[in-house]
Image: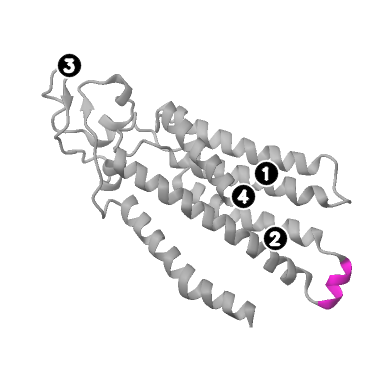
Amino acid sequence: MQARHSILWHLLIDLPILLLVAAVCILLEVGALPSRRAGFTCNDPALSYPHTGDTFSISLVAAITVIVPYLVLWAVETTLQREDEYLKKSKLLTSAKTAAFIYRDYIYGSVFNFTILEVVKCVVGSPRPTFFDLCQPDKASTCNDSEYVSNYRCTSTKYSRYLQIDSSRSFPSAHASLSIYCGLFLAWYLQRRAFSWHNRSVLLVPLLQILCIVYAAVCSLSRLSDHRHHWWDVLVGGAMGALSVLYTVS
């Protein structure tokens, strides 16, 4: 009875809230809801880099953030299942349920992280290093050096409306925050669970933890080499991801 009430609570309360928050985040991301757009300094070299794309696309980062953790959780929990439990019920099914409970907390934390990211991005409205190339503001060709322009519109015909809106959402870095959240959470989980496996390899678990950290670091630093963010965007985004992990596991 208690388990049934718990399921109903999640379906009737938690799930609608989760879907509502996700919908608001998506609307903010695509520019369907109003957001702040900061001005720019005319001929600012920090905003004059050409747009060359992303080493890690947002769809790839989203897929890794959502899919990979559950696969890792499932694999580890399956490995940790005792042999006698296999005789009672499916080992894979039991481990899948255990992984799902841990994954639920992970998803709640990631939604918490992403929601704050989207709100801050829309409130700050900071221009990206590729702002002039993506937006091509109408006042850029007529303003004087060092003049601050706050009222403008994007005139680019080369890039989509989404990229033009996204050109003013540099702070903080979502790539850094999501990748560090994912990487640190998995490293923490492996430390907490996989090290309890008495038959484990001496080097396998540390190697997997290193791979998690390397992914987070490379994805974050690629935002600088791609000129998609300023260094402080990546730093704050990474800090938000790390704090979200602490919030999730505490």
Residue at the image position 57 percent from the left and 79 percent from the top: 5
Observer-nearest of 218 and 242: 242
Asked if residue 7 is positioned above or below residue 98 in the image, the reply reads: below
Residue at the image position 67 percent from the left and 44 percent from the top: 187
Residue extending furthest toward the top = 145
Distance between mark 2 and mark 3 Cα atoms: 57 Å
Kind of residue at disc 3: Asp
Q: Which residue is mark 4?
A: 250
Q: Earlier in the sequence, mark 2 or mark 3?
A: 2
Q: Are marks 3 and 4 in contact (CB under 8 Å)?
A: no
Disc 4 crowd, CA 10 A, few/some/many (<14, 14-19, 20+):
few
Residue 55 visible? The answer is no
Q: Which residue is mark 3?
A: 145
Q: Earlier in the sequence, mark 4 or mark 1?
A: 1
Q: Which residue is mark 1?
A: 187
Q: Nearer the viewer, mark 4 or mark 1?
A: 4
Residue 64 visible? The answer is yes
Q: Earlier in the sequence, mark 1 or mark 3?
A: 3
Q: Which residue is mark 2?
A: 74
